[in-house]
Image (cartoon, grey):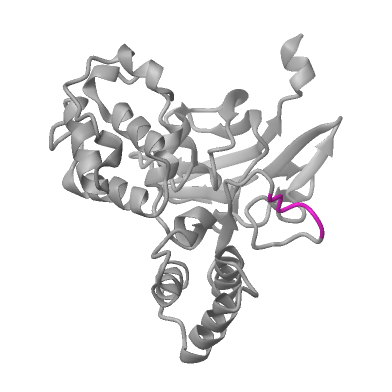
Amino acid sequence: MTIAELHKIPLQALPKDVFSLSADAFVDAWASAFNLTATDLPVEERHNLAQAIRNGTNRMKIIDALRSASPDTNGKLDEFVAQVIRRPADQFALLENFTRFAPDDNVAFLRYSFSKICGREPSEKERLSFEFDLRRNVKTRADIVKQVVAIARRDGQFSLWDTLEENEKAMDGPADQSAAQTMPAGLAYNLNGQETLIFIREVPNSGWMIGPDLLRQPVNVVDSGWKVNPGWLMVGPKRSFQEGSWLVKIDLVQDHAAKIAVQLVANSGLDILLDFTIAGSFVGGLLADIRKEHRFVELRLRVIETADELHWVRLREVSMQRENPREAQT
């Protein structure tokens, strides 16, 4: 967003020195300018945005976030920038959410990173080692966050890191399995020059090919399909896909009264790219626009509870295919 675009929304009076205000005062001033009430922007959200400023987020992005929440926008504005800012820091570590924390206090940074990613405090040896490397400039804070993610994975947690920096490509050099930009082995297939991600595919007379890094219900085969329980059927893989249009392909057979909810989300579910419900059998595809701001993308299938005691579905294919840019232009 640029300052020239602000005339599109009627604004209340702003202080002339608005960009010189403290983080909290800046958020309050723009919230007032956009007529945001306590319902539109709760106190916790105001605090989160102010903290984002203190952590180094560009103030223009904060204005975007506040403008997106304004009732005067009528929901016509894209909110992906705001969602990246609001995404909570957790074991799926966006480097920028951690490296800007407590810029003058490495000990606080280390404790925060371990707490959010590993769910624990750093050990005395971990703290001393990392603090020593930071003090000598042997490692950057980004390097430390990646190592903390590796420690979380070693401890048995499924943790990934990613970054908004375009000059840092996780795919360069040896594949880093803790990087969200690295697709798990066996999940990515090159089909006619297009990237295809197979989540579930039925193999005739053999069973099902199931991609790794997916949380799913156990395969309980009944009548050439799966006996399933209400709730999450499949969730994953929380990876950062290549930017562009992706075709979500689904082919399944189920009772005409059965229902499965499908969502494609990013940024811990804050960005909903697709959201629909399948009733009965279905075969088809839907296009989703994945942008560079959409991190940790996951496809979710949920079995909706019905009166039928036996929930049964035959999943012939669940996949995503990246649309060829040349074909899209023709």
> Main structural element of the magenta stretch: helix, strand or loop?
loop
| Quarter placement of the N terminus | top left
Which residue is painted at 29% across and 19% down in the image?
73
Q: Nearer the viewer, residue 296 or 51?
A: 51
| The image quarter in which residue 14 lies | top left
Q: Is residue 241 left or right of residue 189?
A: left
Residue at the image position 25 percent from the left and 47 percent from the top:
22
Q: Position of residue 62 (x, y in %)?
A: 35, 38
Q: Is 172 or 153 nearer to us in this picture? A: 172
Task: Tell me: residue 104, above or below residue 173.
Answer: below
Q: Residue furthest bottom?
A: 125
Visible residue check, residue 303: no
Q: Which residues are magenta?
A: 168-173
Using the image, determine if residue 201 lies above or below residue 115. Answer: above
Task: Indicate left or right for 153 with 22 as reference.
Answer: right
Relative to 243, residue 23 above or below: below
For the question of whether residue 109 can be seen, the reply is yes
Farthest-out residue, left: 38
115 falls in the magenta region: no
* Residue 147 horizontal/vertical position (percent): 60, 72
